[in-house]
């Protein structure tokens, strides 16, 4: 018996379990069906045909299923997960923001390859509009939106939906690699300043001089620095000496005290005049 082997070297197992094929890609709005699938645009997963699931099952692909999408015409690539296998054969449906990153038009060809990515530990985002600062708790909003994503790629501009408004964020950095998986991970999130954001100018605070109605000279302490505050006027202190600082703690005017001797000297007993009810000129 004769044995025949057309390959000099055996094919590595890693390449034998690798899924790679091309599809015509369309946005989710082109997906036919009675159900609204706008939820696909809110995440980072695609819809593939049923034949892809059969092929992936035979290859024993590890879970979660992650894929690398490449537009060979523009040399742009990104990474994604899969949501369902209900697309027509030869077609896959992508979120609109993902097609923009890949510079793909409706019906364009995209290369889909299965990949294994490291689990994310850190990521940094840059909002593409200062409107993102209006969100009260941006980290909580982003954490909730990333539940619909499977992975992140450095350089991508992802879109999240919050309060019926779409916010775009650029992925500035990911660790430990440029493409990471964010499924069941503990990831630290940081933000850069939004694109086009300008810090408000800090102007020196100007002290407003109190008006005559608002000012109360009795509420201020006097400090002997060459002048004193008295009756809303600055009167020079001609007795001031250099090197002497005098603090007057009790600046409120004290009520005038009347000496007891003066009070007694002014008092005269029985000095009043009496009044009579009898009319003048009438005899008793």
Image: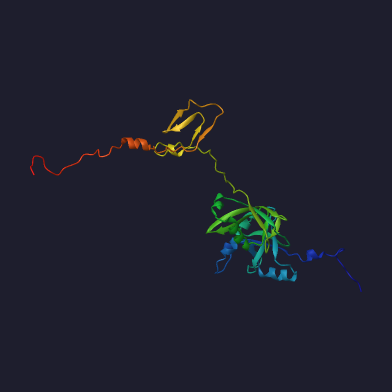
Q: Nearer the viewer, residue 191 or 272?
A: 272
Q: Quadrant of the C terminus?
A: top left
Q: Position of residue 3 (x, y in %)?
A: 89, 71
Q: Is residue 78 left or right of residue 271?
A: right
Q: Nearer the viewer, residue 241 or 173?
A: 241
Coloured how? rainbow
Residue lying furthest bottom = 1
Q: Nearer the viewer, residue 199 or 226?
A: 226
Residue 140: quarter of image: bottom right
Q: Nearer the viewer, residue 7 or 135?
A: 135
Q: Position of residue 178 (x, y in %)?
A: 71, 54
Q: Is residue 177 above or below residue 53?
A: above
Which residue does the image show at 35% across and 35% down from the upper left?
Answer: 262
Q: Position of residue 216 (x, y in %)?
A: 42, 38
Residue lying furthest right = 1
Q: Is residue 268 above or below residue 166?
A: above
Q: Position of residue 222 (x, y in %)?
A: 48, 34
Which residue does the image show at 68% across and 56% down from the upper left?
Answer: 122
Q: Quadrant of the N terminus?
A: bottom right
Q: Is residue 84 left or right of residue 4?
A: left
Q: Can the viewer see residue 92 in this picture?
A: no
Which residue does the image show at 64% across and 54% down from the upper left?
Answer: 101
Q: Can the viewer see residue 218 in this picture?
A: yes
Q: How many marks?
A: 0
Q: Is residue 70 left or right of residue 232?
A: right
Residue 144: quarter of image: bottom right
Residue 49: quarter of image: bottom right
């Amino acid at each position: 018996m004769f044995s025949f082997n057309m390959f000099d070297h055996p094919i590595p197992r890693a390449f034998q379990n690798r899924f790679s094929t091309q599809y015509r890609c369309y946005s989710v709005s082109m997906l036919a069906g009675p159900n609204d699938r706008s939820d696909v645009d809110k995440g980072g997963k695609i819809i593939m045909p049923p034949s892809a699931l059969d092929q992936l099952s035979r290859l024993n692909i590890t879970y979660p299923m992650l894929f690398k999408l490449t537009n060979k015409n523009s040399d742009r690539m990104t990474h994604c997960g899969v949501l369902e296998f209900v697309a027509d054969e030869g077609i896959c449906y992508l979120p609109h923001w993902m097609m923009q990153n890949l510079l793909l038009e409706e019906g364009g060809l995209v290369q889909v390859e299965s990949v294994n990515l490291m689990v994310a530990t850190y990521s940094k985002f840059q909002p593409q509009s200062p409107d993102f600062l209006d969100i009260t708790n941006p980290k909580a909003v982003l954490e909730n939106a990333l539940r619909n994503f499977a992975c992140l790629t450095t350089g991508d501009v992802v879109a999240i939906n919050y309060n019926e408004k779409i916010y775009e964020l650029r992925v500035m950095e990911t660790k430990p690699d440029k493409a990471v998986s964010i499924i069941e991970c503990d990831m630290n999130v940081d933000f850069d300043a939004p694109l086009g954001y300008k810090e408000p100018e800090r102007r020196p605070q100007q002290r407003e001089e109190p008006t005559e109605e608002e000012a109360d000279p009795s509420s201020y302490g006097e400090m002997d620095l060459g002048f004193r505050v008295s009756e809303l006027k600055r009167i020079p202190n001609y007795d001031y000496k250099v090197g002497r600082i005098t603090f007057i703690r009790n600046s409120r005017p004290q009520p005038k005290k009347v000496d007891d001797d003066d009070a007694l000297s002014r008092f005269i007993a029985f000095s009043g005049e009496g009044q009579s009810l009898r009319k003048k000129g009438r005899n008793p």
